Image (cartoon, helix red, strand yellow):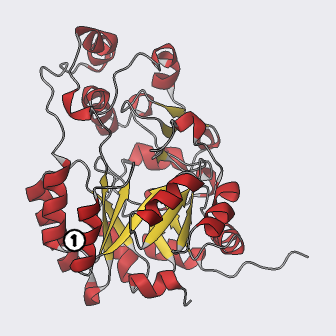
Amino acid sequence: MSTRLVRLLGTDLPIIQGPFGGGLSSVALAAAVSGAGGLGSFGAHHLDPGAITALVAELKAAIPGNRPFNVNLWVPHPGEEVLRLAPADFERLRPLYDRLGIPAPSSYAPPPAFDDQVDALLAAQPPVISFVMGTPPAWVVTEARRRGIVTIGTATTVDEAVAVQAAGFDIVVASGSDAGGHRGAFLRPVAESLVGTFSLVPQVVDAVDIPVVAAGGIADHRGVTAAFALGAEGVQIGTGFLATVQSGASPVHKAALTGPDARVTVLTRLFSGRPARAIINPLIRELVAEEENVPAYPVQNALMQPLRRAAAARGDSQYVNLWAGQAAPLSRPYTAEEYLVTLMKAHPTPA
């Protein structure tokens, strides 16, 4: 397929594997997707500058034929760097730590500084970089263009897509509220930015001149066909790739994505302090009354991390953040290469 998106990215297929943060991305998955003609991605928002440098080198070595790949960062929200823990934040979760037999965190380490992450990423020069949660300072996009790096911004509303184009990005991902994981709204609160993919994509196509990538609720070739009918030039798929053999998701997470519980998802702040779409599990039900009381990201994320890791290691889905989009039940445990083939399969004409 030849679209502006494919020509810009240098891929064979108009398929972008969504980047996953928090250890769910893997070099194996990104390499498999890029090697098979799509755009493999890696979520690096949790990595320090040295780890980002090493990651890009590892991806370049793992992907054959200089095929493109994407590294993603989160744009921080104002005030995150000065957030502090309160005793109540620990006490709220102490029963869960005790239940799993793990120590409560004794300290809080803030995430890596965004500017330092960007400096390392630009210096490493991956073929593509993408951002969620907002648009970075103007110098970032300018420097990326100077270095020949393609830039992708993410929008959850039409106004955000216009802002992404105005910031100089090459491509915009129109991320509908169907999508799994964290919502990236940055101009209005998330509650005012929940636009479904079928409503969002054609409006964004009409509002901007840069290539539009549809994301959210797309998991098979029927969704790909629909995205192109809406005017998109490509699709970004997260949950479907999260279920593949090469993803970094835990076995219990992958099993949940393809099971009946995936039919019901909810936006919750409980796991990270930011709204994210996940399969409902006992932890969400137990703490639902605390949704508005938990601290913001990154504090809540740091407090929940030991619980999530311990539960995943034990194969216990009760305390794991089971990120999933609303089309998760269409996911299958393919290899990434097999999945790409099914996505590009021609959709039969209804009888």
Q: Secondary structure at mark 1?
A: helix
Q: The residue under label 1 is which amino acid type? A: Glu
Vertical side of 248 occupied by 121: above or below: below
Instruction: Please name the residue shown 23% across and 63% down the image.
Output: 139
Q: Disc 1 marks which residue? A: 143
Is 180 left or right of 87, judged from the image as shown?
Answer: right
Picture quadrant of residue 18 = bottom left
Is 296 left or right of 161, judged from the image as shown?
Answer: left
- Residue 309 x/y as whole percent: 28, 36
Picture quadrant of residue 34 = bottom left
Task: Give the mark count.
Answer: 1
Foreground of the two, 255 or 243: 243
Where's the N terminus, which quadrant? bottom right
Foreground of the two, 324 or 193: 193
Whether residue 11 is visible, yes or no, is no
- Residue 133 x/y as whole percent: 39, 48
Whether residue 348 is visible, yes or no, is yes
Mark 1: give few (<14), some (14-19) or many (20+) Cα within 10 Å.
some
Foreground of the two, 228 or 25: 228
Q: Residue furthest left?
A: 50
Vertical side of 313 occupied by 350: above or below: below
Instruction: Please name the residue shown 14% across and 61% down the image.
Output: 119
Instruction: Please name the residue shown 40% across and 75% down the image.
Output: 39
Vertical side of 200 occupied by 310: above or below: above
Where's the C terminus, which quadrant? bottom right
- Residue 158 x/y as whole percent: 59, 55
Is 203 left or right of 18, judged from the image as shown?
Answer: right
- Residue 96 x/y as whole percent: 33, 17
